[in-house]
Amino acid sequence: MGERPPTLEELKYVERLTRRPTRIEPNDISILRAWEENPQLVGKLDVLPLLVDNSPSSYFPPIRSQGSQGSCTCWAACYYYDTYTQAMDEGHTVSGGDNSYICSPAFMYPLINGGVDGGASTSYAVARLNDVGCSSWTLKPYSQSDWTTWPSEAAWTQALQNRTDQAFYIDGSNQTGLDAIKQHLANGNLAATRFNVYSTFLFLLSVRSNRH
């Protein structure tokens, strides 16, 4: 609900910092997943598993709520994607909620929202991770009522340690892009994504919630 198109300046920034792969090569994790799913595939190295779920990983932080703030882009890019990526690279366990290793959406959102709670660009948030990184929740706690307070000096310094090595953009509007995203996930990684929300979205969520 808080995703907006990037401004022209942001778009130029994203294009400068991101690569656009059209194919992702399978790694050992993906290959083993496919083999475990179907032992008859043993020996085949380029077969996707039918289903993957990376959320049980110790690198995946607990599900939390953004509340009423329109910072979903920074939750996707920072809280989930950057936390998972940094934890995987450094061997940290964050599934239990250790805020010292969980990246805070409150670090990034004030930097890219233009001073108002009007949402932000997902691609721009991911690109900024490549440049400035993101501090821990401990050094920049999240509050749904605060979208303007900038990070402290300590948070800025720590954020530099949590920069991504390279930002990637995959177009999911075609089959080639969808296959690349599937392979990326099958390889044990996460992706920050966005999609259009229409007027029926909240109604369908409400109906589903009432059924449960």
Image (cartoon, rainbow, N blue to C red):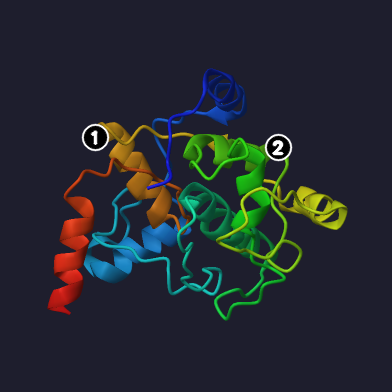
Mark 1 secondary-structure assignment: helix
On the image, the x and y values in percent for residue 40 come to 21, 65
The kind of residue tagged 2 is: Asp
Tag 1 or tag 2, which sits nearer the N-term? 2
Location of residue 116 by image quarter: top right
Categorize mark 1 by other alpha carbons within 10 Å: few (<14), some (14-19), many (20+): few
Determine if residue 116 is in view: yes
Q: Nearer the viewer, residue 32 or 52?
A: 52
On the image, the x and y values in percent for residue 199 come to 20, 46
- Left or right of 48 in this view: 200: left
- Report the number of numbered marks: 2
Q: Nearer the viewer, mark 2 or mark 1?
A: 2
Q: Taking 191 as reference, is 89 above or below it?
A: below
Residue beneath label 1, please? 175
Mark 2 secondary-structure assignment: helix
On the image, the x and y values in percent for residue 49 come to 28, 59
- Left or right of 193 in this view: 48: left
Determine if residue 166 is in view: no
- CA–CA distance in space, label 2 to label 1: 30 Å
* Residue drawn at 50 percent across, 74 percent down: 62
* Residue drawn at 45 percent across, 59 percent down: 68
* Residue drawn at 59 percent across, 20 percent down: 9
Residue beneath label 2, please? 131
- Give the label on residue 199, or none: none
Q: Nearer the viewer, residue 77 or 200?
A: 200
On the image, the x and y values in percent for residue 197 come to 27, 44
